[in-house]
Image: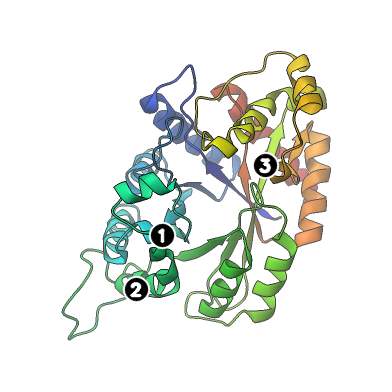
Amino acid sequence: MTALSILDLVRVTEDTDARAALDNARDIAVHAEAWGYRRIWVAEHHNMPGIASAATSVVIGHIAAGTKTIRVGAGGIMLPNHAPYIIAEQFGTLAQLFPGRIDLGLGRAPGTDQLTLRALRRTPEAAENFPQDVLEVQAFLAPAGPNQRIRAVPAAGTEVPLWILGSSNFGAMLAAELGLPYAFASHFAPELLIPALQIYRNRFKPSEQLDRPYTMVGVNIIAASSDDEARRLATTQQMSCEHLPAARAASASRRSTTLNATGRLRKKRKPMSMLARSIVGSPDTVRSGIDALVAETGADELMIVSDVYDHATRLRSFELIASAARIAS
């Protein structure tokens, strides 16, 4: 069976504040653990009023404290925004608190706009150092040498597993060169999925962390009792995508309560290319979609985004997805 995991956007909606969004993320993790999901990740986004995961390591701690076995991590930390030493300290501390359960996915995008990037005291050029910064984080998480003068305390020796995140060929090449697992963000950038996976597998070099290629594919999946109901639920995500060109991706989510809203989106708005690989429908539809995606990509794991407005309905979506995947396997 292909492993299933969750990427949670920690959405602040019209009906919830930031605290409720954080508690909802923790509640999703509790249920996901019971349903057999392998991990839940949250991502670093800044200056987005509708996403409450800016302090990503703190959010990970909140989620991990409410669960027992599910892996919790960053999908990802935008490393150019930070000193590698600080990230090693943060995630090493999380590993001390929750041994064997912390993941560190690393990306090179800023996770925000250029104005906010300046508020972070970083420059766009910082991304050019991403490969070296990854190595630096890895070194600080490794066991300290006897004469090592600078140690990341208490991170040294925790060897938190690193992942390279990407939506282009760059991340695939870097993950292959470093021998790290690779997660492709096809839930918002599906165009290069297949070429990136091919590059990663063809160029992979075994490392101490990983002896063979390991791929995770991000995918939007929304499940409901019927195809029509799932399409109605998917309008929240569609409208979020509509806001992206104006850098409003994280504005408060809005519900579409009728199928007429779905029709208006189809008729009046260009289909969002970033949602091209979405799987939306009943359990049978989801099962077929998962089978087809795994057959096409050979993914070892799927990282699922199920961006549904109502919390209880979103939980039900994840439950149906887990059930459909078990039957698909």
- Left or right of residue 237, residue 13 in this image: left
* Relative image position of residue 5 (x, y in whole percent): 58, 48
Give the numbered dot on residue 220: 3
Taking 269 as reference, is 7 above or below it? Answer: below
Of the image marks 2 and 3, the number of the one nearer the N terminus: 2
Name the residue at 29% across, 76% down.
143
Name the residue at 30% across, 72% down.
140
* Relative image position of residue 182 (x, y in whole percent): 58, 65
**Mark 2 touching mark 1, by CB under 8 A?**
no
Instruction: Tell me how far mark 2 sits from mark 3, CA to CA.
Output: 33 Å
Q: Residues within 10 Å of mark 3 (few under 14, many from 20)?
A: many
* Relative image position of residue 313 (x, y in whole percent): 62, 23
Name the residue at 63% across, 64% down.
215
Give the numbered dot on residue 136: 2
Instruction: Tell me how far mark 3 sits from mark 1, CA to CA.
Output: 29 Å
Task: Specify whether residue 101 is in view.
Answer: no
Q: Residues within 10 Å of mark 1 (few under 14, many from 20)?
A: few
Indicate the secondary structure of the residue bearing disc 2.
helix
- Left or right of residue 119, residue 127 in this image: right
Indicate the secondary structure of the residue bearing disc 3.
strand
Give the numbered dot on residue 201: none
Residue type highlighted by circle 3:
Asn
Residue type highlighted by circle 2:
Glu
Task: Specify whether residue 88 is in view.
Answer: yes
Of the image marks 2 and 1, the number of the one nearer the N terminus: 1
